[in-house]
Image (cartoon, coloured by chain):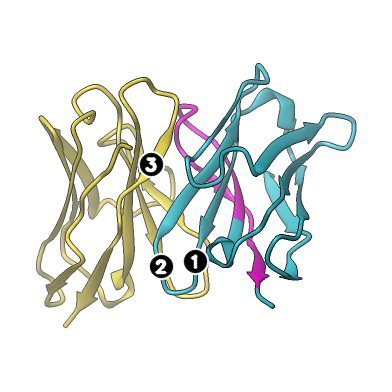
Chain colours: A cyan, B yellow
């Protein structure tokens, strides 16, 4: 059974850094397309970043240069390093995995809340 | 940057048919996906590759595509279908993913 469990969220001051983790089970992280998707309070879904099975990474313009996606194959875990955090980064962050085509988000974690506030 | 456009809200009575549209310039080239999200829950994929239905999703959910518009159709809407629905696709290069703004389906 595919499971994704996020952790690492919390309250952080503007300008600070935070690293989110997504522990995967039931499959191999390095063999799939893995993404981070966020949702600000009361707002819609926003794609943040993807790491392809080959290792290529891509980012939404809103986080490019500040966030870094990575994976640890030995721990079967996906990460999102978030630097220079802003109030507008406040959101629930979900990790997600493709299921059918590489471009879908067929599996989701439960999400972890990041609050950027002084 | 690439955008997908959805109506903010759709309302239907139980048993009627709900249609939610999503428009984007790259949709003739890229598949669309649809997600259902209920309050406090993670999204659930209900349609993939424009019109395919994942296992476990009721048959009343269907998808279609025509040019730059894709449509999610829910036939015989039930009270439990009240939720936010999001379309998702990729830009023309297939590199960047994007979500539509979401549509709140209200069952009257």
Q: Which residue is mark 2?
A: A43
Chain name for mark 1: A
Residue beneath the point at 57% across and 67% down:
A87
Q: Is residue B92 left or right of residue A52?
A: left
Q: Is residue A51 left or right of residue A99?
A: right
Q: Which mark is residue A77?
A: none
The Cα–Cα distance between marks 3 and 2, rounded to whole angstroms, is: 15 Å
Res. B17 image quadrant: bottom left
Vertical order, B104 against A99 (above or below): below
Q: Is residue A91 visible?
A: no
Query: Is the residue marked by circle 2 packed among few (<14), some (14-19), or many (20+) residues within 10 Å?
Result: few
Could you say where residue B95 lies in the image, as x and y percent from the top left?
44, 25
Marks 1 and 2 belong to one chain: yes
Q: Which residue is mark 1?
A: A40
Magenta span covers which residues? A94-116
Q: Is residue A74 visible?
A: yes
- Please, what secondary structure does the residue beneath circle 1 have? loop
């Amino acid at each position: 059974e595919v499971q994704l469990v996020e952790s690492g969220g919390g309250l952080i001051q503007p300008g600070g850094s935070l690293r989110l983790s997504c522990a995967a089970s039931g499959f191999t992280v390095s063999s799939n397309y893995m993404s981070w998707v966020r949702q600000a309070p009361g707002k819609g879904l926003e794609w943040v970043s993807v790491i392809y099975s080959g290792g290529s990474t891509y980012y939404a313009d809103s986080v490019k240069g500040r966030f870094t996606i990575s994976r640890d194959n030995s721990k079967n875990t996906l990460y999102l390093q978030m630097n220079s955090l802003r109030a507008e980064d406040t959101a629930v962050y979900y990790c997600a995995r493709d299921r059918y085509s590489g471009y879908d988000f067929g599996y989701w974690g439960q999400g972890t809340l990041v609050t950027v506030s002084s | 940057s690439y955008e997908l456009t959805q109506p903010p809200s759709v309302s239907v009575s139980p048993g009627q048919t709900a249609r939610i549209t999503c428009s984007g310039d790259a949709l003739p080239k890229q598949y669309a996906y649809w997600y259902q999200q209920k309050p406090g829950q993670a999204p659930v994929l209900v349609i993939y590759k424009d019109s395919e239905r994942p296992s476990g999703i009721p048959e009343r959910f269907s998808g279609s595509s025509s040019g730059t518009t894709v449509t999610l159709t829910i036939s015989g809407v039930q009270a439990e279908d009240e939720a936010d629905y999001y379309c998702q696709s990729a830009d023309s290069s297939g590199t960047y993913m994007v979500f539509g703004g979401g549509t709140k389906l209200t069952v009257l």
